[in-house]
Structures are given as C-alpha cells and as structure tokens.
Image (cartoon, grey):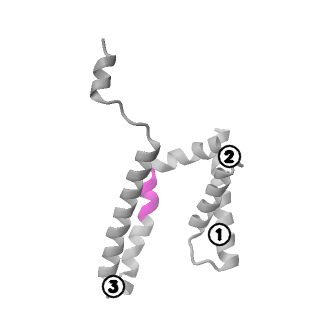
Amino acid sequence: MIALLRGFLWLTGFWLLGETLVVLLGLPVSAGVVGMLLMTAMLMLRVGRLEDIAAASQPLIGLLAMLIMPGVVGVFFVADDFAGQWLAVAVALVGGTLASVLTTLLLMRRFMPPEPSAAATEEASP
C-alpha cells in the first residue's frame, strides 16, 4: 500500500513539475507531456523507484479510456472553431491512429519474446 502511495506521489510530483515548467517558460505543450518526459528521463537514469511508479500506474491503465474521455468530449465544445478544417482534422486523426498502431506493432516485435512455433511445441510434448 505504501508503494502505491509513493508511486502516486511520484506521478503527481512530475505532473506538478511539468505544470511549473510550462507556466514559467511559456511552453506550448501540455504539462502532463512535459512531466512524462521528465519522468522518462529519470527512469532512464535509474534515479527513481520503478516499483513504486509501476504500482501506481498499473491501475490507471485500466481506466485509460475514462481518462481520455474529457478531452474527446471537449472537442464538441470547440466544433465551431474547426468548421472549415474538418478534412485536416480527419487526416490528422487517421494518420495519428495509424502511426500509433504501427509504433505499437514495432515496439511489440522488438521487445516481446517470440512465441514458440507449433513444431517446437509438439516436439516438447510427450
């Protein structure tokens, strides 16, 4: 339970650090993105406790659709601003989705162990 609380403290701390940098430097990027990049750098340098962050992050993955919904719903409130740009928005959405799926595919192929073939499975069974 303590690991979960420490993990949420890490996540909240990096979000606040990102928010601070965005406000102070006037960056045109979301505070969550800046915080996530800073956390990624910290984890790559192996400074923080990955177990704590993983304990807090794992339950959030199941809620990911609910975390994305406010942004999706918010698009309907600014629909008038996109009145003449729906083709560009549609192309960006389709292109972004395809790029995301392709990136996920390449990362899975790179980092997941290969599944045993059917021939190897039959040889291993008595």
For image coordinates 44% across by 41% down, the residue present is 112
The spot of residue 32 in percent (x, y) is 57, 65
Mark toward the start of the polypeptide (1 vs 2): 2
Residue interval drawn in magenta: 63-69
Mark 1 → mark 2, Cα distance in angstroms: 20 Å
For image coordinates 31% across by 30% down, the residue present is 117
Q: Main secondary structure of the magenta part?
A: helix
Q: Residue lying farthest bottom?
A: 84
Point out which mark residue 77 bears. none
Point out which mark residue 6 bears. 2
Q: Is residue 68 magenta?
A: yes
Going by the numbered disc 1, the residue's amino acid type is: Glu
Q: Residues within 10 Å of mark 2 (few under 14, many from 20)?
A: some
Q: Secondary structure at mark 1?
A: helix
Mark 3 → mark 2, Cα distance in angstroms: 44 Å
Point out which mark residue 85 bears. 3
For image coordinates 40% across by 81% down, the residue present is 78
Give the quadrant of the C terminus: top left
